[in-house]
Structure formats: C-alpha cells, structure tokens
Image: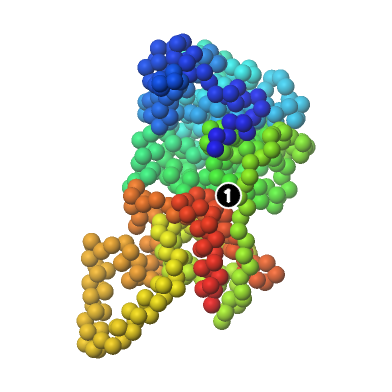
Amino acid sequence: MALNKFMHPRNIYKIPPDFSNLAKKYKEFSEVAKVDITGKVSIDFKDPHALRVLTKCLLKSDFNLDVNIPEDRLVPTLPLRLNYILWIEDLLIAINKNNSVSGIDIGTGACAIYPLLAVVKNKWYMLGTETDEASLMKAKDNIERNKLQHLIKLKKNMSTSIFECVFMDDNDQVFDFCMCNPPFYTNIQELLESRSPARPAPKNGFTGSPHELITEGGELQFCRKIIAESKIYKDRILIFTTMVGHKYNLKELILDLKAESIEHTTTEFCQGRVTRWGLAWTYKDYHFSNLVVPKPKSRKKNAPIVVTLPDLPGFENDINNCLEKIKGILLDLKIMFKVINKRRNEITLSIIAYNNTWSNQRRKRRLSKQSSEIQSKQPKQDLEIQEPHVNEKLNHKDISNEEQISALKHTEVAEEIISKPSCINKDKQEIIVHGIMKLFMKDNRPNVELEYLNGKAGKEGLHQVIQYIKNNWK
C-alpha cells in the first residue's frame, strides 16, 4: 500500500510529481521515461539510473538545485529527505526557534542532500561531517556549484567520535540541532561488498560492516553511540535527532532514553511503500509532548504475539535457562537466530526461517518413529557401519546444509551454523518468517513475545512457531 497520504502534511510530494511535465521540461528525464498506451508517463523505479535522473530533475524543478549524483553513489530518496527536514522545522517551532538556525548533518554523503535542502528551504546554516574523502570532495562540488558555501561548511571526521570534529576548532558555537541518517554506505560497491562473505570494514568509524548496521543490530549500536556522546555535548547541541530504519531499534532506543528520564519524541516518515522513524531528544527544558503532527487515521498495525509459557520442567525459571531451552527448539526447527539485546530479565533475538519446519509435526513424528523401529531391527554390525559414515559426511565438503545441521544438532557447532546466515544461499531461497523474539520473565513465569517483520508465511507463520514452542516446552 502506498503511504503518500501519511507523509508530512507540508511535504510537496504527497501529490506525486507530474512526470509528463518533467519529460517536457528536461530532455534527460524524457530519455528514461516510458509512455504506456493510455499516454501515462512513468519510469522503471528498479533502475538506479532512472531514479538518479528523476531525483536530479526534481531537485532542479522544485528547489532550483543543480546536484550531481555520482553513478557509484546511492540515490537519495527525496520525499524521505524532505520529510526529515520538515520534522526538524516542527522541532524548532516547538522550542520557539525561528531565526539564525544552525544544524549539523552527520555523514552528509556525496550529495550533501540535507544541507542543500535545509539551506534552500529555510536559509539555515549547516555543517556537514563526512569520513570518506571522495564523498567529501563530491559534496564540496555540489555546494559550490549551487554557490551555497557561505551557508554550508564541511568537516572531515578523522576520529571514531561522532561529534568531536565539530567542536575541535570552535569552542563556543552552539548548534540548534543535529541530524543523522544511518547506515552509511559510502558507495554502491561498498553496499554490494557488504552483502558478500568477505566484507571490508567501512570508512565511517563504526566497527562493523555497513550491512551489519541493518542485519545484526549495528544500527541500534550506532544510534546508542550517538545517545552516549550526546551527554558529553548536551550544552553544545539543543536537539539531537536521528533517523531509524527498524521499528524494533526505535523501541529499544526509547527504552534507553526513558531509563535516564531524557525528554524525547518520535515520528513516522512515510513515503512510497517505505516507513522510517525519527527520534529526537534533548537535555534542555523543552517539552515535546504536544509536538507530534496530527496525521490522518493511522493504518492498521500488527500487534506482537505474547504467550506465557509453563514453568520450565526440571530447571529453575531463570531467564538464561529459558534462553537455552528456546535455542534448543530453534535448532530443532533449523531457524536462524541471533541474540541482539540482553537486559537483566529480558533477552531479544532476531529469528529468520528459510524453510517451514514446524508444520505437519504429527506426520513427521510418525515417520520418525517408523524409521527408528526399522533401524532397531537392523543387525548390530549394520549400525556400527553407519556411525563412521556420519563422521565421513561431516568432513565432506559437498555435504548439504540440511544434512550438516541434522548431524550436528544440539552442539555448539550446530548453533553457530544455524545462527549465522552464511549457511543459506539467500539469493535462491525466500524468507518464510522473519521476526523479533523477546524472552522475558513476568511474575517469575517465562513469556515469549514475537513481532512479525516480513516473510512469505506472514504473521500466521509466527503463530505456528509459537505454538510449536508451547507444544515442546517440556
């Protein structure tokens, strides 16, 4: 479902651009546009070149900005960027700041899109930081070609600190806000490399790969780093903000801020078929409670599934014992998992299943029983021959993932194989279920909360997984 109607009320792209007019106005756009039999003009949104041309023409048409978007750099999504800028405007209105505004863009990128939009729309003073030298030079070129260097400054960040480079030269300047849009892919090649087994370290001060910012909790780790550093610079920046790509990460960051009683607010950035979230916090005496911009009636949202499990048989109802039990069940189901957060009485895992191993369990148990009966009737010497055959399988390079996992079940090696995506050819297999599993203790009873993210089996797949866990909690 298109989310345009949920865009920020002032976003000009709530009404889609007139492609026919763009094709008439810009020859470059007419070359990538397509016309159907009804005369409707469109583009291939899966074609990076077409998206690059569209964004460039919209920046020129709607903001009079001449922006060079390099072929080897990611194309900024203009409606999303504009949503973020408009939300910053709302934050500044909330603190009665309407003139001489200055802001910081962390990781400004080759296009310097946020500073350019902020300056053209609002005449704000912007400082962009960047760790990659090539992106910094391209950003500098885009600023100069639009003659905005008197309002936009750039600084290269050569440290692992997020904010240190900002205040290295000027010890007195105070900024009204900072903004950040993780993860930081330097270019398309880095994005592609981040999805391969041998991934180079990124050039952004973050210790993991760019892909890990999304898949392995790195976005959460990076945003937590911003929160941690914000305490140091709380008197130098009035409002701290960041974009968040995963709703689970947003929830965790809100819990972190609440734990320290830090004033904060959130928003949704809706555009096209994509939703992102904005998180803002401050150490000043500002109140964001009435800040949320009224929106149309919200679309239906999926509530997480929460189940209270019986007492853990034979063990103390301890969070770590329950985690080991959960791990064993996930191993049985060949569901990939990774612990992404631990608190005193709460552990959160990311789970992904590429095969439905939990359905038709009665039939599978019956077949397993029949197989066991047949094996028990075999001569002892046959069984002795089979055992080394298993070991031989484990050492054979061409053994299938499924056989390998089955042979190593309930061992540390099995957990390593199943909990890491390297054993799955993701290009050939669809995700059946992808979700967030939270294990927590309430009234000394184990509880499991499952939140659906995506997958072919839908939310019903999660219902089946939790039912399997209940049936096997013994």
Q: In this view, does 449 lie above or below 294?
A: below
Structural crowding at the residue carrying mark 1, measured as other residues with C-alpha within 10 Å and reported as few (<14), some (14–19) or many (≥20)? some
Whole-percent x, y for residue 447 in the image: 62, 66
Q: Is residue 106 in sight in this rendering?
A: no
Direction from residue 264 to residue 153 in the image, left or right: left
Whole-percent x, y for residue 31 in the image: 37, 17
**Residue toward you, 368 or 122:** 368
Q: Which residue, as the protein is rendered here, is positioned at the far front?
A: 38
Q: What residue type is labelled 1?
A: Tyr
The residue located at (31%, 86%) in the rendering is 376
Q: Is residue 447 in sight in this rendering?
A: yes
Is disc 1 placed on a helix, strand or loop? helix
Whole-percent x, y for residue 229 in the image: 61, 42
The residue located at (63%, 33%) in the rendering is 6
The residue located at (52%, 14%) in the rendering is 61
Direction from residue 261 to residue 19 in the image, left or right: left
Count numbered badges in the picture.
Answer: 1
Residue bearing mark 1: 248
Q: Is residue 225 above or below residue 360?
A: above
Q: In this view, does 4 lie above or below 369?
A: above
Q: Please tell me in which quadrant of the rendered image residue 304 appears.
A: bottom right
The residue located at (76%, 39%) in the rendering is 289
Visual colour scheme:
rainbow
Whole-percent x, y for residue 180 in the image: 56, 35
Q: Please tell me in which quadrant of the rendered image residue 30 appears.
A: top left
Quadrant (top left, top right, bottom left, bottom right) of the N terminus: top right
**Residue toward you, 446 or 36:** 36
Quadrant (top left, top right, bottom left, bottom right) of the C terminus: bottom right
